[in-house]
Amino acid sequence: MILTPERRLSALGGLLLLALAMCSRNFSDAGDPAFIRWLSLAGIAYLLAIRELFYSPRFSKRIIVIGLILASVWQVLFLLKPPGADDDIHRYLWDGRVQRLGHNPYVLVPSDPALAQVHTSETRTLNHPDLPSPYPPGAELFFRGITAIHESVFALKAAFVLCDLGIVLVLLDFLRRSGQAAHWVLAYAWNPLLASEVAGSGHVDVVGALLLVVSVAALWRKWRAIAAVAFALAVAVKFLPIVLLPLYWRRLRIRDALLAVFAFVLLYLPFLERGRIPTGSLGAYVQSFRFNGPVFAMLERVTNPQVAAGLALLAGLLTAIWVRTRSADFSSGAFAWPMATSLLFAPVVYPWYLLWMLPFLRSVSTVPIVIWTVSIIPTYYVWHLRALGLPWLVPGWIILLEYGAVATAVAVLGLRRLLRPRVAG
């Protein structure tokens, strides 16, 4: 019996549901081998599903609806699980809480004994308590807004899941208006990192990704002011998308750019400290935070961390300039690759950082990044090693597996392009 593409895709959706359901049962031990095995199985099913999306021009609306329902089910399964004791979401909750109490999260140090009574049971376990917050003002104001509605990690996770839903809706509208196949929304919605890092651990990156998708969709429709402001807000959640600036060149008017700058500066006003823009622990992040960044580690041997971080920014900007001059089209890869390149040079590459690129993974050129979202899964093993009292360090074999898979995909794509027969003009 030969399975049709729709039946194969449905079967892969069922396999994803099974793998992620089992994964959610082990979520309290995120680095445990059982968790990694099930999440890796989900990743393999996801890659096979991407293959089906490439090989079939269209899928029925019924299959897409079923696929989105399946994604909702495994999102709920992870949403109902408590995050890790020291996941970033506890810092988010703290930052939102202290803002509502009239304090500046860029100044307060959570471990200060004078603040012991300010903590709640959900903020006492936040990570890096000896440092103030590193998050940009857009993220901080989001934390404040959600905690004003309900002060709990569950409320924050629910807000992040709603942002995930927002991305799905914007993508569906964009795909329909641009004449692309609607089934590509599943390339976003089925990625296993959404379950573990949005509904599970709850990471603010999905908020920035939503704003960035809104910006790109508005830019395509020539809603320039909306595109500019949404882009500024995305950068104000985390600085990663700043490398996409060249893609907005000549697509925005000067007044739109000024509006974006005004919106960005306005977000910092509530946090000014003695007339100066605060940076919190951002400097400490660049100076001493390290995880899964082999390129940065090599650069750091020959220069200081600040210069190496500057090179990461430069690499992303140059990639954006290259894709901007190469094509005027709104290709998905044009928005994915500059951020991916910058991350490749970054001192810290956590799995949830790749959330920024997920909405733009729907072209052959982005296949290496698609593979990266799966090959990065073994890095969770470091959490298991830490629980055993071992150093916070990604083993070499995991680095080789993760980046080797990406490098292989890049090489294969490059070879295919070189061997592609040229059409005589």
Image (cartoon, helix red, strand yellow):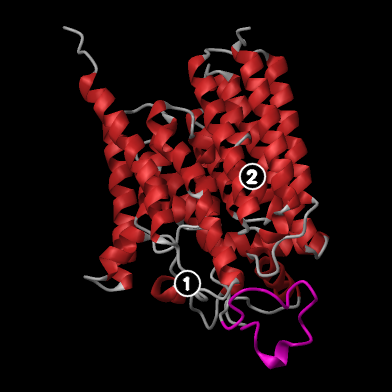
Is 112 colored magenta in this rendering?
A: yes
In the structure shown, which secondary structural element does the residue marked by tag 2 occupy? helix
**In the visual, does 107 lie left or right of 321?**
right
Residue at 49% from the left image edge and 35% from the top image edge: 360
In the structure shown, which secondary structural element does the residue marked by tag 1 occupy? helix
Q: Position of residue 245 (x, y in %)?
A: 38, 47
Q: Quadrant of the C terminus?
A: top left
**Labels 1, 2: front one:** 2
Task: Report how far apart the C-alphas of labels 1 and 2 lie in the structure.
Answer: 34 Å
Q: Position of residue 192 (x, y in %)?
A: 61, 42
Amino acid at dot 2? Trp
Residue 38, numbered label: 2
Does 75 sit above or below residue 123?
above
Quadrant of res 252: top left
Quadrant of res 414: top left
Residue at 39% from the left image edge and 45% from the top image edge: 254
Which region is colored magenta? 109-130
Could you tell me if residue 236 is visible in this image? no
| For marks 1 and 2 on the same chain, the one whose residue lies earlier in the sequence | 2
Quadrant of res 120: bottom right
Residue 282, numbered label: 1
Could you tell me if residue 45 is visible in this image? yes
